[in-house]
Image: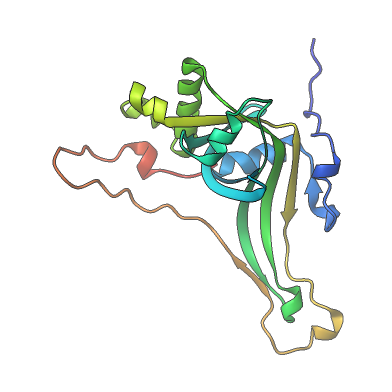
Amino acid sequence: MPPTGPAAPYPQTTRTTPTRSRHRVSYDRELVHGILDEGYLCHLGFVRDGRPVVLPTLYARDGERLYVHGSTGARVVRAAGEPGPGLPVCLTVTHVDGLVLARSAFHHSVNYRSVVVHGTARPVTDEAAKRRAFDLVVDHVIPGRSADCRPADARELAATAVLELDLAEVSAKVRTGGPNDDPEDLSLPYWSGVLPVTTVHGAPVPAGGPGETPPAPAYLTGYARP
């Protein structure tokens, strides 16, 4: 029988080893997957014509691989599709959980959970694989939505790009807790503590214009992230 138990952590590399606050870093796969699955917006960094570029875009996780949504005209997609092994990238996902206010300006901070992925992005070119990846991205943002809308036609599929990025060099970083006030500041008359931050999705707003819009489906009225 195959071994059971916790999955092995991601290997630590020079690129996934921070220079500061190393005690907050983790290579735990379940932690990494949880942070990725809770979000749907990432920032994708790469170098184009010798200059750094960072783009916000949508993504989805499928096991140990990320699919990143884009346009066929985007610079990152064109660069990833050039001859060669792919495009070196750095992808980040961050959740802000609280604003940490200390008695001194220096010790103000943020409670957060973040993931950094280093790797090589490659375009998904096979049509069936591309459609599957496209559905994964749609369903990652709104679970169940890909089956409840018209699928992309050939023209729309040609205008849409999906990049794949393996989860190989990965690290998570987490800060929790209150402020780290210096002992000599504890008697100062300033408020100190944490202001929690949450993301709230409001009630669905139907589209206007001609055509009849059915009632909002349950996956929207009860929408919540993992």
Please name whichever residue, 7 or 155, is drawn nearer the observer in this view of the structure: 155
In the displayed structure image, the side of residue 47 where residue 125 appears, left or right: left
In the depicted structure, whether residue 198 falls above or below residue 183 = above
Please name whichever residue, 56 or 214, is drawn nearer the observer in this view of the structure: 56
Residue at the extreme front of the image, as rendered: 49
In the displayed structure image, the side of residue 71 where residue 66 appears, left or right: right
Rendering coords of residue 92 (x, y %): 65, 46
Rendering coords of residue 158 (x, y %): 41, 25
Based on the displayed image, in which of its 4 quarters is residue 217 positioned? top left
Q: Quadrant of the N terminus?
A: top right
Please name whichever residue, 128 or 32, is drawn nearer the observer in this view of the structure: 128
Based on the displayed image, in which of its 4 quarters is residue 84 positioned? top right
Please name whichever residue, 170 or 51, is drawn nearer the observer in this view of the structure: 51
From where the camera sits, is residue 49 visible? yes
**Residue at 19% from the left image edge and 47% from the top image edge:** 208
**Residue at 39% from the left image edge and 32% from the top image edge:** 145
**Residue at 49% from the left image edge and 33% from the top image edge:** 137
